[in-house]
Amino acid sequence: MFSSLPIILAKVFLKMHMRDRQAIIFSLFFPIMFMLALGFTSGNRDPIELGVVNHAQSELAERLIATLNDNPLFNITEGSEDALRKALIEGKSKIVLILPTAFQGTESASELRLLVDRAQMRQLSLILPVFEKALVVVERELRNTEPLFSLTVEDVKARSQGYIDFLLPGLLAFTLMTISISGSGFNLVEYRRKGILKRLFVTPIQPRDFIMGLMLARLLLCIVQLSILLGIAIFFLGATVVGDFASLYFVIVLATFVFLCLGFCLGSIAKTQQAIIAIGNLFIFPQMFLSGIFFPIDSLPGLIQPLASVLPLSFTANALREISNNGLSLLEILPQLTGIAVWFVIGFLLATRLFVWKEVAN
C-alpha cells in the first residue's frame, strides 16, 4: 500500500535540490543550447551543388537543365567535364550530371551519367527520384503525350517534418535519462558521503520508501525541465508534435522511473564520486550513439542493431518519436511500452536489492 512517507520524503528532497541553483541552471543549460544549435543548423539547409556537363547542346538538354534549375533542391553549375570532375574531387560540388552527345530527343535511348563521391552516395536516394521525374516531364513534352493516370497524395496528418521534429523526441529521451541518472545515482553517492543515509538508517524508513520518495521528487523536476525544452522546441524552433501530449507525458513518466531505478543501481555499486561519474558515463554515452537519437537505428551496422534496439533509451526514444512524429496512440506502441515496463521491473528489483544504508554493495 502506498503510504504518505514517500511523499513527505519527496518534499524534503525537492527543498534540498532547490537550494542548489547551480545544478538547476546547468541541468537545463546544456540540453537547451544543444537543441538550439542543432535546430538552427538543421533548419538552414543549403541547396545541393549540382554540376551539369552539356555535351548534347540540344533543345532537349536545355529543357532538362531548366527543369532541374527550377527545383529549389539544386544549385546548377554548368561547365566542362574536367572542371566539374575536379570540383567534385575538391568537395566544391556534390554530384555531376553528364548529358551525352546522343541526348537529342531521337527515338533511341540515351544513357546519362552521374558522378558522385562515395561519401555522398547516401544522397542518391534523394536525388535520383528528382532526376527521374524531370526526365519524365521532358519526355512527355517532347512526345506530346499525356500520362495514363494521375496520382494525388493527400497527407491526412497535414504536417511537414524536418530534422528538428526527428531530433526532439530523442533529445527529450536523452535529457530524461541524464537528469534521472544524476538525480538518483549521483545523489545516492553524495548522500552516503555526507552521512545522510547513515542517519536515516536508525529511522523506520524502509529502502523502498526512500527510493520512492527520491523518485517522486526527481520525477517532478524532470517533467518541469522537459516541458521547458518542449516549449522552446515548439515555439522557437517550429517543431511539431502530432500526437497526444497526454500519451507523450505518460511515456516520459514511465521512462523516468526506469532510469531513476537504474541510477539507484549504479549509485549502490559505486563507492566514490569519481566512480559514479565513470560508471554513469559508461552507461549513458553508448546509449547516446546507439539508441537512434541523432539518426535511425536502421543506419547502424546490422550486427549492432539487435543490441541497440533493446536498450532502455531506444525503447524510450522510439515511443516518444512514434507519438510525436506519427501520432500513434499508446495501444499502437505496445512493443515499446512493454520494453520500458520490463526495464522498469528489472531496475526496481535491482535498486531495492542493491540498496544499502551504510556500506556500498559488494
Image (spheres, rainbow, N blue to C red):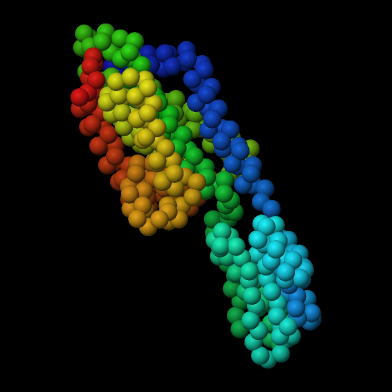
Q: Residue furthest bottom?
A: 107
Residue under the point 79% across and 79% down: 57
Question: Residue 359, percent across and down?
Answer: 23, 16
Can residue 39 be seen from the camera position used here?
A: yes
Front-most of 324 and 122?
Answer: 122
Question: Residue 48, percent across and down?
Answer: 67, 59
Front-most of 3 and 220?
Answer: 220
Residue under the point 52% across and 42% down: 168
Question: Residue 21, percent across and down?
Answer: 51, 16
User: Where is residue 342, by image quadrant?
Assistant: top left
* 95 relative to 27, above or below: below
Query: Which quarter of the figure is the N terminus placed in?
Result: top left
Instruction: Please indicate whether residue 79 sits to the left or right of residue 197 in the image.
Output: right
Question: Residue 208, percent across and down?
Answer: 24, 23
User: Where is residue 95, by image quadrant?
Assistant: bottom right
Front-most of 56 and 343?
Answer: 56
Give the tally of numbered discs.
0
Residue under the point 59% across and 73% down: 151
User: Where is residue 317, by image quadrant?
Assistant: top left
Instruction: Please indicate whether residue 306 sits to the left or right of residue 62 in the image.
Output: left
